[in-house]
Image (tube, helix red, strand yellow):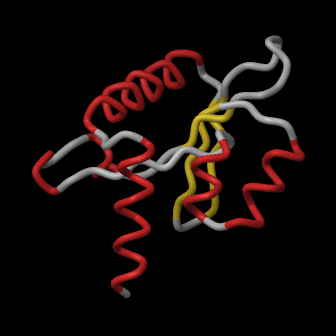
Amino acid sequence: MRCSPERERSGRRSGLTTRSRSGCVGRSAYLDSVGLHDGHNGSFTLLDFPYASDPRVLYIEHAEGSTHIEDPARVKSATLTFKHLSKLALTPGQSAELIERLAAER
């Protein structure tokens, strides 16, 4: 996902669900009924940059720090995993509603 710095800052100030709706940050929720899926293997982030000449990067945080992966085959694998997970997830609107409802219950 790409967005302007102004749009990203605006989303950062407004909270999780607002950021998700800003188009700069994506959040997806899954119902328990989906069962086991690749998201259980750990989180990852696919980073896109404003210039087409800059390759997509796979970013993974772990207990000892973080890893940036630029290997095209590994980035492609993560991209396919993301696409598969996206098909299993609730829509962005449904995800935001679920997150808001669960936060309100806390």
Q: Residue at x 37, y 39 (%)?
A: 91
Give the tally of numbered discs: 0
Q: Residue 34 in the image: x percent, y percent?
A: 14, 45
Residue toward you, 73 or 4: 4
Residue toward you, 72 or 106: 106
User: Looking at the image, is 104 positioned above or below residue 47?
Assistant: below
Q: Residue 86 in the image: x percent, y percent?
A: 36, 33
**Residue lying farthest to the right in this orientation:** 6
Q: Residue at x 53, y 67 (%)?
A: 63
User: Looking at the image, is 46 positioned above or below residue 101?
Assistant: above
**Residue lying farthest to the bottom in this orientation:** 106
Q: Residue 43 in the image: x percent, y percent?
A: 44, 51
Q: Residue at x 58, y 63 (%)?
A: 16
Q: Residue at x 33, y 35 (%)?
A: 85
Q: Quadrant of the N terminus?
A: top right
**Residue lying farthest to the top in this orientation:** 53
Q: Residue 99 in the image: x percent, y percent?
A: 40, 64
- In screen coordinates, is 31 left or right of 81? left
Q: Residue 46 occupies which quadrant of the picture?
A: top right
Q: Quadrant of the C terminus?
A: bottom left
